[in-house]
Image (tube, rainbow, N blue to C red):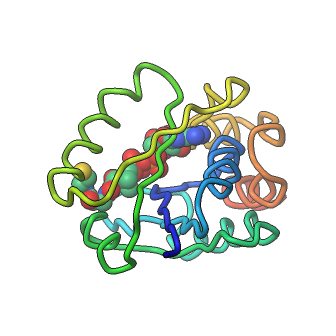
Amino acid sequence: MEKIAVYPGSFDPVTNGHLDIIKRASKLFDRLIVAVLHNSSKDSLFTFEERVNLLKEVVKDIDNVEVDCFTGLLIDYCNNKKVNAIIRGLRAVSDFEYELQMAQMNRQLNRDIETVILTTSTKYSFISSSLIKEVGKHKGDISQFVPNNVSKQVYKKLHGRE
Ligand code: COA
């Protein structure tokens, strides 16, 4: 039986930290689905279609990774897709409580789906999508924190040019 994992998130936008988790998780499972939350209530810089397209470009060379989207409960999406595990990245102690609560709630909703938490590589542990947007807003260099295409699109969104 194929082992399938899902890596859910907002990805507004995808960063090198996310990409690091994607690459490492893809080695642990037969298939990895990166699932973008389509959440109309959360203010985002990129539309949900743009976030999906940026991710597709970023993972195009990783054979067993695909990009999808979901609305509603993550666990319902996992049930529909016959997913075995949910992947989350842990950057710092501050992430822990939220991740633990989510993992426990999801486990309560479906005991057959495990949450697998990967510790983020230390060189990416301070990166977040909000900080990328903030640094980009003030025209700082974000190219070392996000994939090339993302860096260009963040600048285009915020300043009308790459
Ligand atoms: N590298 C860099 N940044 C990372 C990261 C990593 N490895 N891991 C997380 N982050 C950052 C993200 O960039 C984001 O930063 P921001 O807050 O500055 O935007 C932040 O951590 C959290 O984002 P993300 O990991 O995308 O999680 P999220 O909180 O946006 O989404 C869901 C979490 C989608 C998994 C969760 O809300 C969900 O499942 N929603 C569906 C509804 C549901 O089922 N709810 C019940 C859950 S029990």
Vertical placement of 49 versus 18: above or below? below
Q: Which residue is found at the position 56% from the left and 31% from the top?
A: 119
Vertical placement of 54 versus 97: above or below? below
Is 103 on the left or on the right of 62, as rendered? left
Q: Which residue is found at the position 55% from the left and 76% from the top?
A: 49
Q: Residue lying at the far left in this picture: please name it.
A: 108
Determine the image quadrant of residue 95: top left
x then y, percent, for residue 29: 58, 61
Q: Residue lying at the far front in this picture: please name it.
A: 1
Q: How many marks?
A: 0
Q: Which residue is found at the position 82% from the left and 36% from the top?
A: 141
Is 64 on the left or on the right of 86, as rendered? right
Q: Which residue is found at the position 68% from the left and 67% from the top?
A: 54
Q: Nearer the viewer, residue 109 or 10?
A: 109
Vertical placement of 123 versus 136: above or below? above
Q: Quadrant of the C terminus?
A: bottom right
Determine the image quadrant of residue 85: bottom left
Q: Nearer the viewer, residue 43 or 89?
A: 89
x then y, percent, for residue 14: 63, 53
Is 81 on the left or on the right of 92, as rendered? left
x then y, percent, for residue 140: 77, 34
Q: Residue lying at the far top in this picture: please name it.
A: 93
x then y, percent, for residue 40: 33, 68
